[in-house]
Image: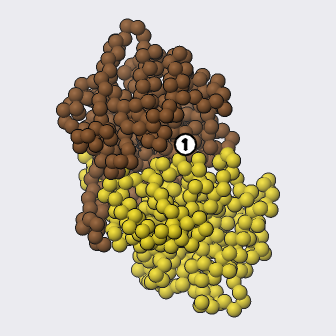
Chain colours: A brown, B yellow
Amino acid sequence: MSRSIDLAVIPGDGIGQEVVAQGLKVLNAVLPQDVKLETKEYDLGAQRWHRTGDTLPDAELEALRNHDAILLGAIGDPSVPSGVLERGLLLKLRFAFDHFINLRPSKLFPNTATPLAGRPDIDFVVVREGTEGPYTGNGGSLRTGTPAEVATEVSLNTAYGVERVVRDAFERAAARPRKKLTLVHKNNVLVYAGHLWKNTFDRVAAEYPQVSTDYLHVDAATIFFVTQPERFDVIVTDNLFGDILTDLAAAVTGGIGLAASGNINPTGAFPSMFEPVHGSAPDIAGQGKADPTATILSVALLLRHLGYDTEATRIEDAVSADLAERDGAATRTTDEIGDALAVRV
Amino acid sequence: MSRSIDLAVIPGDGIGQEVVAQGLKVLNAVLPQDVKLETKEYDLGAQRWHRTGDTLPDAELEALRNHDAILLGAIGDPSVPSGVLERGLLLKLRFAFDHFINLRPSKLFPNTATPLAGRPDIDFVVVREGTEGPYTGNGGSLRTGTPAEVATEVSLNTAYGVERVVRDAFERAAARPRKKLTLVHKNNVLVYAGHLWKNTFDRVAAEYPQVSTDYLHVDAATIFFVTQPERFDVIVTDNLFGDILTDLAAAVTGGIGLAASGNINPTGAFPSMFEPVHGSAPDIAGQGKADPTATILSVALLLRHLGYDTEATRIEDAVSADLAERDGAATRTTDEIGDALAVRV
Ligand SMILES: CC(C)[C@H](C(=O)O)[C@@H](O)C(=O)O
Ligand SMILES: CC(C)[C@H](C(=O)O)[C@@H](O)C(=O)O
C-alpha cells in the first residue's frame, strides 16, 4: 500500500467548496500519521468558465491524470447554460479517465428521515455504467430552432463496455453476504441495447453460480425502490437508468445529503474520482446549511479504492454512530457535522 | 355527442381478460339506456403469437382503425421473447394510431396504502409523449453476439412531435385549478433533445401566462415524487422518462392496481386506446386476485375522451367512495370489486 496520497481537489460550484472542506477535514483526521497527504486544488466550474470561457483545458486534464485520485464537490450553476459544465467538465472527466464503474451505495442509516413509511431495511449498491449509453454525447440537431427541427440522442453500448461493468458487479455481489445481483434495463422496448445487456449478464452469470440473479425493467425497478427496497443487494445498470435510480435511492435513504459516489477505473490506468451524488445547490451555498456527509462518505469510498480499508470503515462507522446519536430536532451546520465526524474517526 | 360507442376490446394476456371484463361491466352499468354500446373482441397477445406467429396483422390493424376507441387489458408473457409483443403489438398500436398523448393521472385515493409516510396530498397528471423519443425502434446491433458487438438506440425528437404534446399539456394545465406545468427532461446531458424540449416549452409558455411553469431533470423529479409529490400538477415529458415516472407515480399513489392511462390521439384521426398502466402479471392470472380498478378508471378516461364527461366523473367518484369505505383488512376478488363499482355508478 502506498503511504502517500496525492489528491486532486475540485471544489466546483455552489456548496461544493463547503462540503469538500469537511471531506478533507475528515480525511486528515482519519489518516495514520505516516501517510503523507498532498492536495492540489483545481479551479474549475462556473466561476472559471465565466472568467475565461474554459471548462477543462487539456493542460489541466493532463495534470489531473497524474494524481492518485480526485475529490470533487459539485458542478453546475444556473448562470451557465445547461450542459456546458456537465458535458465540458464533469462528464469529460468521467469519460477521459474511463470511469466505467459509477459506484453508488444506498443505505438507510439510523435516525435519518426516509419518506417511506415503515423504515424498510435498505442496504444496496448500484453499479452504474459510466462511459456509454445515452451519455456519450452522440446526437445532434437538424434545422435547429425551426418548426422542422429533428433532434437525436444515440445510446451507444458495446460488448466491451457492458461486459466489464457486469463483471465488476458480479464480483461485488459475490463479495457481499446476500450475493444477489439485479440487472435493470428496459429490454422490452430498447431491444438492441437491452439484449446486449441481458445476454452479457446471463453469460457472465454462469461463471458466478453462487450469485443469485434477477432482471427488472427500469420502470418496475422504481416501484420496488419504494415498496420493497430491501429486496435489492447489488444492482447493475446503464448510465442513464443508473442516474435516475440513484437519485431515487438517495431520496428513500434519507436524502441526497447522504449519498456518496465513486467514478472508478478499477484498472488503475487513470485516477478515480469521488463525489457526492448531490448537485451544487446554489440556493443554500455559502450559508453553512449543506450536509457534508455525502462528501465525507465519498472520501470513505476513495480511501477504500486506494487500499485504506480500515480508514474507510472508520469513516462509515463514524457516520452511522453520529446519525444514531443525532438529535432529530437539532440541525447542525456544515462545519459542525464535519467537526463531529473528524473527532469520531 | 354520438349516442353509440363502437368499442374494440383487446383483453391480451395474463390478468388482462379478468380486468377487462370488469371494465366492461362498469361501462355497461354507467352508460345511459339510449347509448348503444357495441364491442368487438380481438384475439391478440401471447396465445395468438404462439398459435400463429402473428403479433398484429395488417387486416386487424385496419379493422381496429374503424372503432371509436380501444380498451386494452395487458400485453406480455414470459414465454414470449422480450420485445416481441411490446414492439409488435402494443407499441405498434400506439405508433400506428399516432397516440401522441399518453395520459396518466396520479391521485392518492382515500384509504389506499401508499408507501410514503405522512400520506401527502397527491393529485397530478403526467402527459407522456407517446410516439417519439427512444421508443421509435430506431437502433441496431452490429456483430451481434460477438465480443465486438455494438448496439445503439436512437432517441428521435421532432419540433412537430414535441410541440403538439407540450401544447396539449399547457391546455390541460390551464384547465386545472392550480394551473402548474412541469417539464421533465435531462437537458444537462441529453443536450440536443433536451434543448428542443426546453425551447419549445418556453416558447409555448409565452402563450399561457396564466400557467406557472417549472423545469426538473428526470433524476431530481424522482426525488420529488417521494419527498414532495404534492408539488406537481401537470407534468409533460418524453416517452421513456414518462414510462419511468408513471410507474413510480403509481407506486406512491397506492400501487399499479389503481393507475389508469389513455393513449390518445386528440385529433380524432385514429381511435384512442385506454389501458391500465400495469402489466399482465402472469403470476396471479386467473385467480381473481387482480385489482380491476386501474382498468375501470381507464374506462373513465375513455368515456371522457368520447365526450361522456358525466359518466366518466361518476366512475371516478364511485372509485373514490368505494375506496373510502373499503375495509383495510378485507381483500376482495376482481369480480367483487367490479360488482361494487358497477352498483355504485
Ligand atoms: C450533473 C449530471 C451530469 C450528473 C449525471 O447525470 O450523471 C449527475 O446527475 C449525477 O448523477 O452525477
Ligand atoms: C410494456 C411496455 C412496452 C410499456 C411501455 O414501456 O410504454 C409499459 O411499461 C407502459 O408503461 O405502458
Residue nearest the viewer, comparing A6 with A57: A57
**Which residue occupies the extreme top position in the image?**
A34
Q: Residue at x 37, y 43 (%)?
A: A76
Q: Position of residue A41 (x, y in %)?
A: 31, 26
Say above or below: B321 vs B146.
below
Q: Secondary structure at mark 1?
A: helix
The residue sitting at 54% across, 16% down in the picture is A344
Q: In the rendered image of this protein, does residue B180 appear above or below residue A205? A: below
Nearer to us in this view, A213 or A124? A124
Residue at left offset 54%, top offset 24%: A336
The chain letter under disc 1 is: A
Ligand 1 position by quadrant: top left
Q: Quadrant of residue B15?
A: bottom right
Residue B254 at x, y percent in the picture: 66, 56
The N terminus of chain B: image quadrant: bottom right
**Residue A251 location (% of width, % of height):** 55, 42
- Residue matched to label 1: A251
- Where, by quadrant of the figure, is residue A319 drawn? top right
Image quarter where the C terminus of chain B lies is: bottom right
Q: Residue at x 54, y 71 (%)?
A: B174
Work out whether residue B242 can be spotted.
no
